[in-house]
Image: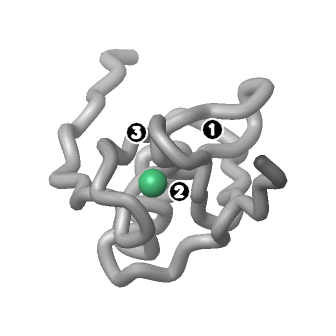
Amino acid sequence: MASFTPTFEIDECIACGGPGLLQSEGGWCVYVECLDCGSHTAFFEYKGEEDRIEAERKAVELWNRGKVIREARLE
Ligand SMILES: [Zn+2]
C-alpha cells in the first residue's frame, strides 16, 4: 500500500511566534509542538496509516486555531 503524507500549513506559535512542528509520539499519536517554547496541542491517537493523516489534520487544525497548551516553565 502506498503511503501518502500530505503537507499541512502550520502557523507560528501563538505564544512566542516560533515554528510549530508536527510530532509523533511512540507510533500511536501525533501533536503539534512549538520548537521554541514547548507549547503543544492535545495528543491525537491513531490506529493506522489513514487514521494517522486524519489525526495529523486535527492536530494542525487545533494548533492553527490557537488551542495550545502552554508549557509552564520555571526559569
Ligand atoms: Zn512557542
| Residue at 32% over, 47% down | 18
State ligand 1's quadrant.
Answer: bottom left
Tell me which colouring the rendered structure shows. one colour
Residue ranking furthest to the front: 75
Q: CA distance from mark 1 to mark 2?
A: 10 Å
Where disc 2 sits, the SS reads helix
Q: Name which residue type carries label 2.
A: Ala
Where disc 1 sits, the SS reads loop
Label 3, on which residue? Answer: 21
Give above or below for 59 relative to 23. Answer: below
Identify the image quadrant of the N terminus: top left
| Position of residue 55 measured from the top left corner of the image (x, y, whole percent) | 53, 56
> In the displayed structure, does residue 54 sit left or right of residue 9?
right
Label 2, on which residue? Answer: 55
Q: Is residue 51 visible?
A: no
Q: Nearer the viewer, residue 59 or 52?
A: 59
- Mark 1 residue crowding within 10 angstroms, few (<14) / some (14–19) / many (20+): few
Q: Name which residue type carries label 1.
A: Gly
